[in-house]
Amino acid sequence: MIDIGELLRAYRKGYFPMSDPSDGKLYWCQPYNRAIIPMESYRPSRDVRRLLRRNDFRVRFNTDFEGVIRACAAPRPNAVETWISESIIESYLELNRLGIAHSVESWYGDELAGGLYGLAIGGAFFGESMFYRRSYASRIAFDRLVMHLRKRGYLLLDAQIMNPHLQKLGAVDIPHKAYMQMLDAALHKKIPFL
């Protein structure tokens, strides 16, 4: 398990952990460009709006954090390796017990159909990973997260490293210096997640 104090200090300094799938070794990442979600301009896609109206999914917070993180760590059809090691899982389970790590879950009946997890520190939410078992389930969870963070007054939704999926959700890359300024402002807030 990663030392919790070290982990929280790293996030406050703009770092996040990833493990090497080949040997499980932990690395601290601080990308030159950081992916963030501009919450003020976020708009759900037409498909997500349609699904929200149909009410097929129920969204819950923190009812199955371990289920979410383990689903995020599971092999995927397009990638058999994962950066989420058992050490990372154990650390985030502890952060969840401490009220710092949170899951947003999309339920389809009694099935955990998708979701995401991350850390809430001050006025920043650090999104770690997401998964889905049913189409759009993770996007529904993401939409509810953005709405929740907006309502609570969060300043930063950190998506860490840009990828095509995050781009579809509205993520943008910003330079490290701009990210650190946003992070500093967000960390000066004291906003409970729930």
Image (cartoon, helix red, strand yellow):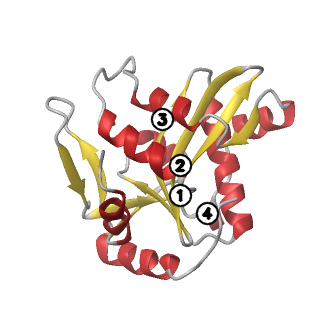
Tag 2: residue type?
Asn
Label located before the other in sequence (3 or 1): 3
User: Disc 3 vs disc 4: Cβ atoms closer than 8 Å?
Assistant: no
Q: Is mark 3 on a helix, strand or loop?
A: helix
| Residues packed near mark 2 inside 10 Å, few (<14), some (14 to 19) or many (20 plus) | some
Spatial CA distance of label 2 from label 4 is: 24 Å
- Figure quadrant of residue 60: top right
- Which of discs 3 and 1 lies nearer the camera? The answer is 1
Look at the picture and state if 13 lies above or below 168: below
Tag 1: residue type?
Ile
At horizontal 65% and vertical 55% (from top left) the residue drawn is: 146
Q: Which residue is disc 4 drawn over?
A: 39
Spatial CA distance of label 3 from label 4 is: 24 Å
Spatial CA distance of label 3 from label 1 is: 14 Å
User: Where is residue 91 shown, x and y percent of the image?
Assistant: 38, 46
Tag 3: residue type?
Ile
Look at the picture and state if 131 lies above or below 157: above
Q: Which residue is disc 3 drawn over?
A: 69
Q: Which residue is disc 2 drawn over?
A: 96
Can I make out residue 128 in this image? Answer: no
- Which of discs 3 and 4 lies nearer the camera? The answer is 3
| Residues packed near mark 4 inside 10 Å, few (<14), some (14 to 19) or many (20 plus) | some
Spatial CA distance of label 4 from label 1 is: 20 Å
At horizontal 54% and vertical 49% (from top left) the residue drawn is: 97
At horizontal 71% and vertical 28% (from top left) the residue drawn is: 107
54 sits left or right of 178 in the view: right
User: Disc 1 vs disc 2: Cβ atoms closer than 8 Å?
Assistant: yes
Q: Which residue is disc 1 drawn over?
A: 100
Task: State the quadrant of the N terminus.
Answer: top left
